[in-house]
Image: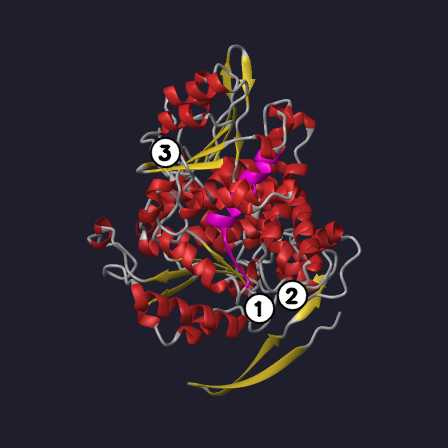
Amino acid sequence: MISRQTFLRAVVLGCGGERKVWALLERRTMMNGVEKTNGEDLATEEQLITPWTVSVASGYTLLRDPRHNKGLAFTENERDAHYLRGLLPPALMTQELQEKKLMHNLRQYEVPLQRYMAMMDLQERNERLFYKLLIDNVEELLPVVYTPTVGEACQKYGSIFRRPQGLYISLKEKGKILEVLKNWPESNIQVIVVTDGERILGLGDLGCQGMGIPVGKLSLYTALGGLRPSACLPVTIDVGTNNEKLLNDEFYIGLRQRRATGQEYAELLEEFMTAVKKNYGEKVLVQFEDFANHNAFELLEKYSPTHLVFNDDIQGTASVVLAGLLAALKLVGGALADHRFLFLGAGEAGTGIAELIALEISKQTKAPLEETRKKIWLVDSKGLIVSSRKESLQHFKKPWAHDHEPVKGLLDAVKAIKPTVLIGSSGVGKTFTKEVVEAMASINEKPLILALSNPTSQSECTAEEAYTWSKGRAIFASGSPFDPVEYNRKVFVPGQANNAYIFPGFGLGLIMSGAIRVHDDMLLAASEALAAQVKQENFDKGLIYPPFSNIRNISANIAAKVAAKAYELGLASRLPRPKDLVKYAESCMYSPVYRSYR
């Protein structure tokens, strides 16, 4: 382990003449194969570190540096050494006591958006305490920092906006994107989550206000997958919005124009992707998030051969749903190939899930992909996707156009196809009606129903509806969380098919192996790793996903399987391969525990 540090002497002319300023420029270092950028990351938790910014942070500056601020947890010695006397009340608190106090305060808020804003405020003033809180209370706080609350936050982002948390790249920056990337204070970026805000969750075009999504996703990359906060970069590409309400909102923070499309849009994205690779290197992971269907598929197809890219809406959703299906086989019986699948929704999520299911069946049975696709049917806004509609279909729907007479509605499709699995990815709430669920229950002893659309208001049905209408026989999971349901004196605990099970561990696996491309087999490996984490005690409650309380261990296991597949496929650049990939993944994870300062 070699740390190369360069001291720079800068001469600044001020009103008092020449003033000497010393800054520490820290170059890339390596720790367990994962790039680290500062001494704090290289030290053990017991070692003393120096809180560097551009100089040794002290006094008022230290209290306002979120990476180093500890609030009342600064010790007596630290208060003396860093000129904090008088700037803090005399009481001393442990990080655990601070955590207890903050959780008490958060629970006093009755409005979820208030909790979200309180968490964002904490992240901006005390980074380590924010992540300690999130890691230790993940099941309670995940719905606060991500779906469903983040949806409302994005809708109101202009009103609650306080200080920027990522990079905003708009049409105004065309031709200067590389310069804009260099404005970001961190140079060793490992993961970028980028959106253009056109399809935020199930809420539609929120333009520049979609920044809440990359910010939220990257906080989960750190909390659940252990990536350093300084290695994560949230980006919003602002090409305008077609949302009239936002265009007429005096508080809207983005470009006030209709969305750019076609060549103008493509050129901006090309410049961004080229600049990212030039500035951060071949191995930076770019995660596309909440792009509209037409752009999502095109961007993934265009940049997959040349960049390390991942679309969570297409690939992450697919992987987490496949994991749930593999686990559910323990409850419903049979092999994956024995089941029939019907989707409501044929967009990027629906077709992405369908393709990964077909790939897994092909892998298990050795049957051609064209054959395994025939077990999967999709319904869009015009009805069942069948061969007679092929000429009018978008290109990503065509593989799912099978021979069948036209069928208009979902209920008729259920009766005609007789699926064992019903999956909702439509973004339209209340579409799994009582008649649809009853039809599924009449066909199957244990109907598997996945209502995946987010946020909660857009879910195809609620957990209570699924259990009640199926008379307690449904195996149910949703995209957004639902409370346990009591039916016929039995308590059912609905599972959550949350992408947060997959993408943090998946990203960690790519980074720790030095992967240069994403391959479908890595997604299958991630699904199988997640399904393997579901224990008998979870199945006994009807759950097809493990509890989030163990998410860091789950992420380490997923990372290990993804990294193993990268090495197997010859796509890993970090050599030699570690002997124990799970332990290696755990050793790479960021710890939010406070450090002691000299």
Q: Is residue 351 left or right of residue 261?
A: right
Q: Is residue 450 above or below residue 43?
A: above
Which labelled disc corresponds to residue 77? none
- Quick check: can you spot residue 311? yes
Mark 1 vs mark 2, CA separation in Å: 8 Å
Label 2 residue SS? strand
Q: What residue is drawn where x is 63% and y is 28%?
A: 334
- The answer to whether marks 1 and 2 mark residues whose Cβ atoms lie closer than 8 Å is yes
Instruction: For the N terminus, give its image quadrant.
Output: bottom right
| Crowd rating for badge 3 (residues with CA inside 10 Å; few <14, some 14–19, many 20+) | some
Number of dots carrying numbers: 3
Q: What residue is drawn where x is 43% and y is 69%?
A: 272
Q: On the image, numbered disc 3 is attached to which residue?
A: 457
Q: Is residue 284 above or below residue 175?
A: above
Q: Residue furthest bottom?
A: 17
Label 1 residue SS? loop
The residue under label 2 is which amino acid type? Lys
The residue under label 3 is which amino acid type? Ser
Asked whether 264 or 108 is in front, the reply is 264
What segment is highlighted magenta in the picture? 308-326
User: Which comes before the other along the chain, label 3 or label 2?
Assistant: 2
Which labelled disc corresponds to residue 188? 1
Asked if residue 314 is among those painted magenta in the image, a careful observer would answer yes
Asked whether 113 or 226 is in front, the reply is 226
Asked whether 383 or 491 is in front, the reply is 383
Which labelled disc corresponds to residue 36? 2
The residue under label 1 is which amino acid type? Asn
Secondary structure that dominates the magenta span: helix
